[in-house]
Image: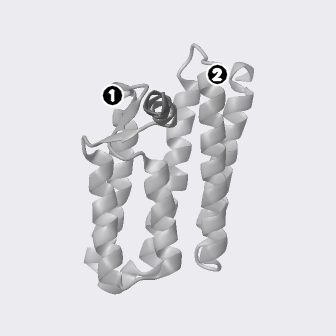
């Protein structure tokens, strides 16, 4: 187990920890839960940069990252939106939150099969989860939250290309030349 204790994996564990604590915070303080998800997003960005600079030979870190992302950007936002707004819509609200969670899981499972350096296939789960948390804090009418939840889920499993940060940098450099 010692070989898996690396700085990128510890940072990924910070993502998972922030997600778990956010899950506990949802009923008492939705804003605090949202801040914790922003912290998880920071950890996720940092572990991604570290992993790209020092790629390891094993898949432990990639698998740990997907599990952390599913909790922080799938389970927590779905629960926050359900408990905050969508529970008012009964089974339809539950179905929307479950669909978001499943789409996020499918997106994470598909990622290693479709990974490209310049763009993602479908919306990555971290921005989708952050948007869901912001939606939960904003508190729009439930029907708007419902439509947004289904839309974000659909974008995650779509084949729409979304640029990666390195891909955006390369495009900007070519454009500015």
Tell me the CA gap for discs 2 and 1. Answer: 20 Å
Q: Is residue 172 above or below residue 55?
A: below
Residue 32: quarter of image:
bottom right
Task: Indicate the colouring scheme.
Answer: one colour
Residue 125 in the image: state x and y as whole percent: 44, 49
- On residue 114, the disc is 1
Can the viewer see residue 54 in this picture?
Answer: yes
Question: Sequence order check: which comes first, mark 2 or mark 1?
Answer: 2
Are there few (<14), some (14-19), or many (20+) residues within 10 Å of tag 1? Answer: few
- On residue 142, the disc is none
Residue furthest toward the front? Answer: 177
Q: How many marks?
A: 2
Residue 145 in the image: state x and y as whole percent: 36, 75
Question: Secondary structure beneath disc 1?
Answer: helix
Residue 105 in the image: state x and y as whole percent: 38, 46
Q: Is residue 134 above or below residue 174?
A: below
Give me the residue at 40% from left, 38% from top: 163
């Amino acid at each position: 187990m010692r070989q898996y204790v690396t700085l990128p994996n510890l940072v990924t564990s910070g993502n998972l920890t922030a997600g778990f604590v956010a899950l506990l915070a949802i009923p008492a303080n939705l804003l605090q839960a949202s801040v914790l998800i922003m912290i998880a997003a920071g950890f996720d960005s940092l572990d991604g940069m570290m992993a790209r600079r020092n790629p390891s030979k094993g898949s432990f870190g990639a698998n740990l990252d997907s599990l952390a992302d599913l909790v922080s950007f799938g389970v927590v936002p779905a629960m926050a939106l359900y408990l905050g707004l969508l529970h008012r819509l009964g089974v339809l609200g539950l179905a929307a939150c479950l669909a978001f969670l499943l789409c996020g899981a499918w997106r994470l499972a598909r990622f290693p099969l479709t990974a490209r350096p310049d763009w993602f296939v479908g919306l990555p789960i971290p921005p989708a989860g952050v948007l869901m948390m912001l939606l939960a804090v904003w508190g729009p009418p439930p029907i708007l939250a419902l439509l947004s939840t289904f839309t974000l889920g659909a974008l995650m499993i779509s084949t729409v290309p979304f640029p990666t940060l390195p891909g955006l940098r390369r495009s900007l450099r070519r454009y500015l030349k």
